[in-house]
Image (cartoon, rainbow, N blue to C red):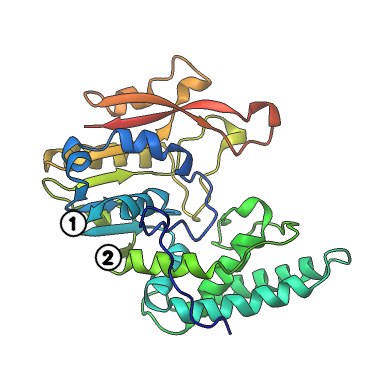
Amino acid sequence: MAGNVVIKLDDNGLLDAKPFLKWVGGKRQLLDEIEARLPKKIVESRQIDKYVEPFVGGGAVFFFLKNHFDVKESIICDVNRELIVGYKTIKNNPQELIEKLSSIENKYLTLSRENDERKEFYYEIRDLYNKEMLDFDYENYNEGWIERSKYLIFLNKTCFNGMFRQNKKGEFNVPHGRYANPTICDSENILKVSKALQDTKIICGDFTETEDYIDEGAFVYFDPPYRPLDDTSNFTGYFKGGFDDSDQQKLAEFFSEMDNKGADLLLSNSDPKNVDPKDDFFEELYCGYNIERVQARRSINSKGSKRGAINELMISN
């Protein structure tokens, strides 16, 4: 049993909640660039009347804003239903989740690394997780969501590179990692995340599901699956459906529609000019909007020589 955990604020009295999952493409490294592009009224008042994030992913931007600004209303959305199970569980039952995570963490850390006991346990849990997916009730919140969230976090913290990837069947297919002492149950952060989520609406669906919540004055941050720069950097498998150029075009149309509503918009994506200076894909999609380039570090590529500083796009209205 984990017992009761007290939420501690940082030295500045801030909540300091962080993403509860490792998430490929997370925006923690770009928070300064994102903050620099917030609407002037938000920066001056330190207040956000309504925040909408249609691709919440790991939630780095959401938690940053909740930590540093007075967010009156927030709506987060993601098409990845496993991810939404985790968010809703932490919002509703953080203490129960902590107890289950503490138990599985203790069991895992007592297993031997040398004779593959941990590896065997990992694959047992992964197989169970994928098998239960077939009959899991994703529509109605119940106690089973706590157990599934336990497995989600366990697999995320112990798999290779902390990735979340699904095959075409929707099965989690990341191999085991070999971390010596992974933190599976971060009790304090889970409670901070729960506190940040208490006044937040959580939606499972594609980005268009947020349309009715976006209105004049809302601040919307879009962080879609990035358009791959080449075959080796193609990582759009965080849910089984993928996200191709037609989806990028659909998103650009949605961006324009939300601009017409009077919302303040900011969108991140890859910069194809890193590999092809003549590729104007995003310039054509977002013609008339502000397109800026910022530096980021590539963390996924099969070739080590292609990892490092590259440009990413920041598109705003």
Q: Quadrant of the N terminus?
A: bottom right
176 w.r.t. 275: above or below:
below
The residue depicted at 19 percent of the width and 58 percent of the height is 72
Measuring from the top left, give residue 170's x and y in whole percent. Answer: 54, 61
Give SS at disc 2.
Answer: strand
The residue depicted at 56 percent of the width and 38 percent of the height is 234
Under mark 1, the amino acid is Tyr
Could you say which is closer to the camera, residue 84 or residue 51? 51
**Image side of residue 171 versus residue 196, left or right:** right
Measuring from the top left, give residue 316's x and y in whole percent. Answer: 26, 32
The residue depicted at 37 percent of the width and 42 percent of the height is 247
**Image side of residue 35 versus residue 178, left or right:** left
* Residue 135 can be seen, yes or no: no
Could you say which is closer to the camera, residue 178 or residue 213? 178
Residue on which the image places disc 1: 213
Give SS at disc 1.
Answer: helix
The residue depicted at 37 percent of the width and 52 percent of the height is 12
Under mark 2, the amino acid is Lys
Mark toward the viewer: 2 or 1? 2
Measuring from the top left, give residue 310's x and y in whole percent. Answer: 52, 26
Residue on which the image places disc 2: 201
**Image side of residue 79 versus residue 21, left or right:** left
Measuring from the top left, give residue 29's x and y in whole percent. Answer: 48, 39
